[in-house]
Amino acid sequence: MTLKLIGAGFGRTGTWSTFAALNRLGLPSYHMQEVILNKANKGHLDFWRKVANSAPGSQHDWNRVFANYTATVDNPGCCVWKELMVAYPDAKVLLTLHPRGAEAWYESTIDTIYFTENVWQFKILEWLTPFGRKFGDMSRKLVWGRTLNGVMEDRTKAVARYNAYVEEVMAAVPPQKLLVYKVTEGWAPLCEFLGVALPNEPFPNLNDRETIKKIIRDVVKGSYIMLGLTIAAIVAVVAAVWWWLG
């Protein structure tokens, strides 16, 4: 397989519903969930961490992660849309926008996927687990740093970055290869852009906020368990040393 569609839209712009729609249209699609939830993709997080620690514009063996996909949406693929346009020059570009605008995108992002930065319990997992360290490093450098310019703590700057990014993509991609799209528009513009038939079913409307919230709750629960086990281990070691010295 080769990439036919490069999703440049930020996470939290309807990318999960778009991901489901593209799969329904016969375009196996890549999404952050393919990195962290698909057990068949072992090693993908290490790949993206390497990308995050490389200079912007660097080319990598993209087929290592995209070999089984013809489209990518959401993070981390959207963070390297320019690089992917070079690697896959025949691919089209899909720029998803939040249906209610930049302010709503910001609120949604802060409330969900920014948990790697604003939920202190995730820092415990970074400290105690290899996955936490890898995911935290990758997302901090590639998503929140490189792509969003480190502005997420400032609402005004983040909204401005969102709007500037949209203009940046629109200026860089030839109009005939670009679809600027909101999931509220449904199947028609997407199918026309891709040259495929309209499905006779409703467009996917996935409530990924609730799913992400559940993941955050699981992270919090896991961090408390890890912290408890660590404290218990430290207490056991101190007790053993005390006993030995006594």
Image (cartoon, grey):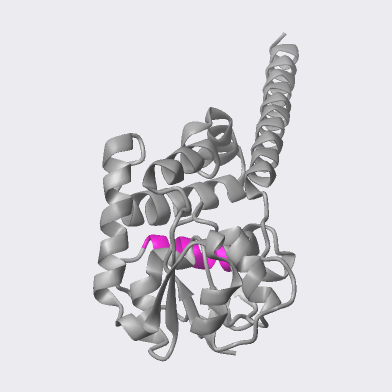
Q: Position of residue 192 (x, y in %)?
A: 52, 83
Q: Quadrant location of the C terminus?
A: top right
- Examine the rendered structure and indicate whether residue 133 appears above or below residue 154: below
Res 123 seen here: yes
Position of 111 relative to 25 (above/below): above
Residue at 40 percent across and 61 percent down: it is 52
Which one is nearer the viewer's eye here, 12 or 43? 12
Residue 45 on the magenta segment:
yes
* Among the 4 quarters of the image, the one containing residue 18: bottom right
Residue 46 left/right relative to 57: right
**Which part of the image, by quadrant, shows the N terminus?**
bottom right
Q: Residue at x 66, y 32 (%)?
A: 220
- Give residue 186's position: percent from left, percent from top: 58, 67
Front-most of 200 and 3? 200
Q: Residue at x 44, y 46 (%)?
A: 105
Which residue is found at the position 61% from the left and 67% from the top? 19
Q: Main secondary structure of the magenta part?
A: helix
Q: Which residues are magenta?
A: 42-53
**Residue 209 within the magenta-colored segment of the rendering:** no
Q: Is residue 56 visible?
A: no
Q: Is residue 205 left or right of residue 178?
A: right
Q: In this view of the protein, which residue sits in the foreground, 241 or 204? A: 204
